[in-house]
Image (cartoon, rainbow, N blue to C red):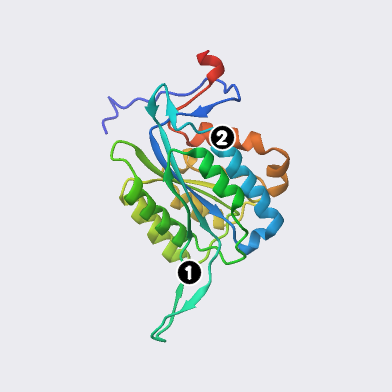
């Protein structure tokens, strides 16, 4: 780029109102962590975040189809012996809900989802999301995956490779880890998020903070990750 022509300009400098909704033409898969490290009560809090998040997305706006949403449930990781006895494989993530415009159905599926107690098979969540987007995605819409997790993962190399595959297909990756500590594992999540990571990564500071401030963090995720969010109050 030419230093003579290159310029920087701030964008989205206005204050948020607090009632923002997402009206982007986007095919979004929520990759939801239900792994054993969360524990059952922790998963209830994470599930509540995902349910509330769906209320701020709109599948239609002024007659135009906007958000199409699906859910990949992971954290059911187990080693499964191969039938030929040659080794083991990792259990696939669960396709909880295919991409659909029926966001109420998405919300119901999340509400009915169960704590899985397995290890954090994030790579398999990416694989399931990839399949959902290839089968139900729209050529005219942005494809995206939002990972809501406790920040832990298994099989770093495999997860990194799958994240790279998604990004090579122009699939946007958003990371929303829920953790009190800022340990080194979060640096990998920043690398796996789409770049620049600063606009595609949002750490929620622990389950307790999330439990008592759910809508605050819903708001943060909407205005940061949605490529087209508006305030109905300002549009009124």
Local secondary structure at mark 2: loop
Q: Residue furthest bottom?
A: 85
Q: Is residue 184 above or below residue 157?
A: above
Q: Residue at x 65, y 34 (%)?
A: 216
**Residue where numbered disc 2 is placed:** 55
Identify the residue at image location x=31%, y=27%. 6
* Residue position for label 1: 91
Using the rendered view, name the quadrant where residue 113 is placed.
bottom right
Question: Alpha carbon of mark 2 to alpha carbon of mark 1: how far?
Answer: 31 Å
Say if residue 180 shows up in the picture: no
Q: Position of residue 229 (x, y in %)?
A: 48, 27
Q: Which quadrant does the N terminus fall into?
A: top left
Q: Callout 2: 10 Å neighbours few (<14), some, many (20+)?
A: some
Q: Nearer the viewer, residue 200 or 130?
A: 130
Residue 95 picture location, percent across and down: 46, 56
The answer to whether residue 58 of the structure is visible from this angle is yes
Q: Quadrant of residue 119?
A: bottom right
The answer to whether 36 is drawn above or below residue 233 in the figure is below
- SS at mark 1 in the image: loop
């Amino acid at each position: 780029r030419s230093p003579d022509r290159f310029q920087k300009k701030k964008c989205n400098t206005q204050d948020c109102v607090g009632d923002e909704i997402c009206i982007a033409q986007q095919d979004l898969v929520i990759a939801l962590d239900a792994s054993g490290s969360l524990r059952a009560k922790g998963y209830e809090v994470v599930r509540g975040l995902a349910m509330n998040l769906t209320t701020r997305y709109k599948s239609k706006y002024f007659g135009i189809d906007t958000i199409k949403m699906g859910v990949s449930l992971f954290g059911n990781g187990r080693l499964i012996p191969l039938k030929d006895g040659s080794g083991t494989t990792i259990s696939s993530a669960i396709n909880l809900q295919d991409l659909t415009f029926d966001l109420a159905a998405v919300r119901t599926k999340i509400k009915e989802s169960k704590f899985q107690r397995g290890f954090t098979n994030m790579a398999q969540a990416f694989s399931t999301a990839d399949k959902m987007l290839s089968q139900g995605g729209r050529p005219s819409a942005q494809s995206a995956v939002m990972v809501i997790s406790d920040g832990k993962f298994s099989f770093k190399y495999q997860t990194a490779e799958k994240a790279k595959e998604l990004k090579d297909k122009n699939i946007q990756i958003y990371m929303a880890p829920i953790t009190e500590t800022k340990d080194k594992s979060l640096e990998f999540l920043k690398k796996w998020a789409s770049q620049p990571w600063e606009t595609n990564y949002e750490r929620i500071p622990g389950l307790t903070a999330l439990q008592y401030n759910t809508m605050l963090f819903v708001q943060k995720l909407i205005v940061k990750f949605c490529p087209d969010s508006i305030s109905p109050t300002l549009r009124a």
